[in-house]
Every structure is written in C-alpha cells, then in structure tokens.
Image (tube, grey):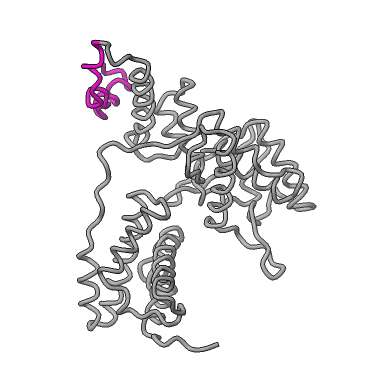
Amino acid sequence: MKRAKNPELFTLIHEYFRVYLPRQKQCRPNTIKAYQVAMELLLDYVKEKRDIRLADVSIDMLDQRTIIAFLNWLENKRGCSVATRNLRLQGIRSFFAFAADADPTLMVHRNNVYKVKLAKAPKSIAVTYMSETALAAVLAQPDTSTARGFRDMFLMVLLYDTGARIQEVMDIQLKDIRFADPPLVTLRGKEQKIRNVALMGATVKHYRKYLEVFHEGEDFRYSERYLFYSTRNGIPCRMTEDNIRKRVHSYGTAARKSCLEVPENVHPHMFRHTRAMHLYQHGMPLPLISQWLGHSELETTLIYAHADSEMKRKAIEAATPESSPLRGFMNADRFVISDDNMVKRLYGLR
C-alpha cells in the first residue's frame, strides 16, 4: 500500500478525530460521528471530481470554491436539507480551526473556509411525508420471503412505529427492547437524551420473527449486540446509515411506479415525519407528539401543524373554481400559522 502524498492532511485528520475531539474537547460520540461524516463526504467529493486517489487529496484542494461546490452538491444531488448542509459546514470549519491551531501556516485556509456562509433556512419548512396509502406501498416492496427482505421491511416498520431518527434505530442494542406491558424500546437521541417509546403489537410480532432469523439463540435481555448489523469478514458490525438510505430510496422508487402518492425521494427520516403527521391528523396533541419525538422545544414540532394546515389550504384551493369570489381571498400568507399564536392555543391561553 502506497503512502499518502499529503501526509500532513491525514496526520491532522487523525489527530483531530482520535485525540482532539474525544480527549481534549471531550465531544460526545454522536458529535464526532457527524464531523467524521462531513469530512468523509468532502474528501470523497474532491477525489471523484479530480479523479484521483483519496491518498492524493491535499489540504490545498479543500479551498473556498471547492467547499461551496461541495455544499451545493449536498443540497442539489444528495437532497440534503439546509440544516444538514449547515451541519456539514460546521464540521469542516471545526477541522480547519483545529488545523490552524496546530499549524499556524494553515491560518489562511482556515480564514477562507470561514468565509463560506451558512445557508439561510426558508421561512416556512416544508415537511414531506407519506400518506397512509403511500406508506403501505413502500412497506410492500421488500421480498419478505428472503431474510434480507424481511429485515428491510421490519426496519422500515420500526422507523415508522417509533418515529426514530435513523441513527437512533441503528444504535439500538438487543437489550434496549423489552417485552414489558406495553413493550418498549429505549432510544438514544441527540446529546444522549434517552426516551422510551411503546411498540405496537404488530411491530412486536415482526421483532420476534426477526430475532429468530438474525439473533437465533441470543439472550436479548442483556445482549449489547446491535439490532441491525452487517457481517464483514465474518464479524457482525453496526449497520451504516448510508446503506439504509440507499435501500429505503430504492424501495420508494419501486413503490412510486405503482403508487403516484409516494414522494419522489423517500428517505429514512421521512418515516419520522410521516408518523408524526399521522398522529397529528388522528388527533394527538402537539405537546405529546413533541415529547414522543424527543424534541427539546415545542416550536420544533409546530412544523407538523403548519404542514397539515397548508395541505388543507391547497385542497380547498384546488376544489374552488377560478370564477369563485373566494379566489381573491386565497393568499397563502393568510394561512401561515404564527408560532406564538399556536403555542398560546395549545396551552389554553386563547
């Protein structure tokens, strides 16, 4: 194996992730992982664009123009949200700040990276979710007569039933699911916040079968093995989020051929939005949904109230003839929900 031509870059990366973040900054594993993903995606992007080996990527190639192009690629090609784009940029900024402290000659690189501005989020966040018909179409795609197909179906069912983030599901260990009354799964969210989520009876049935196929003979009550895993060189390893994203996307694409209600880009986080929207539409109060999702602030959950109101507005508008005098009052701005007003209504102040 050839040595990297630019050892200073990879030496800095090694020190940053193996020493600086975990030992000096004492960052949480989830934070380190998010920064690792940002740097890995950036390096892979540069490698592909320049058609070179990863080992040949140098720190000089990570300039301001390249980083802006990379961030645009995340949004336009990978379908990342503005929040994810900004998270990746923050990870890259953090690395260059560390690099400049370690080697002052790199301060010019650090300054150029910091000139890349965070993207502004849209005023109203569009929530893409699946209708109950679309959800059923996606869940019907895996071939459950095979072990892999059954695993993929159960994984999507669990994503929907728990409303969990993909990382939370990938982090589930066997001991985290308990056959209590009701059955519960322990999820570890952002900043290591822990919450227990009840499981539906159908999900528990799928889980029992899944145990028989993928964890035969395992004492799940105490096992720290990951619920979902991939086998590499004969060793079970935690399944990666990227692997799941690709599989979920492929099932969504297949389902859309027979059900046009399925959104164009189905991704794991859409199951979380879908579950929250279904609960809201069936009458669950937003404060309960907020707790169930593990949101720190109720305002974060208000996007589901706005999305549902916007859906109703569009349905009414579509059903109203152009000649109707009501058309003059159908301004979208009139239907935007004020966060403050919604909070006041939720807590009985109005």
Q: Which image quarter holds the N terminus?
A: bottom right
Name above or below for residue 34 compared with residue 7. Answer: above
Q: Nearer the viewer, residue 116 or 175?
A: 116
Quadrant in the picture for residue 97: bottom left
Rendered location of residue 290, percent (x, y): 41, 33
Residue drawn 28% across the image and 63% down it: 68
Rendered location of residue 255, percent (x, y): 59, 39
Residue drawn 38% across the image and 57% down it: 74
**Main secondary structure of the magenta stretch:** helix
Q: How many marks?
A: 0
Residue sitting farthest toward the right: 217
Rendered location of residue 234, percent (x, y): 72, 68
Magenta stretch holds residue 64: no
Rendered location of residue 198, percent (x, y): 58, 34
Bounds of the magenta span? 325-350
Name above or below for residue 169 compared with residue 18. Answer: above
Q: Which image quarter holds the C terminus?
A: top left
Question: Horizontal placement of 172 versus 42: left or right?
Answer: right
Residue drawn 24% across the image and 72% down it: 110
Quadrant in the picture for residue 72: bottom left
Magenta stretch holds residue 328: yes
Residue sitting farthest toward the top: 325
Question: Horizontal placement of 10 versus 252: left or right?
Answer: left
Name above or below for residue 2 compared with residue 305. Answer: below
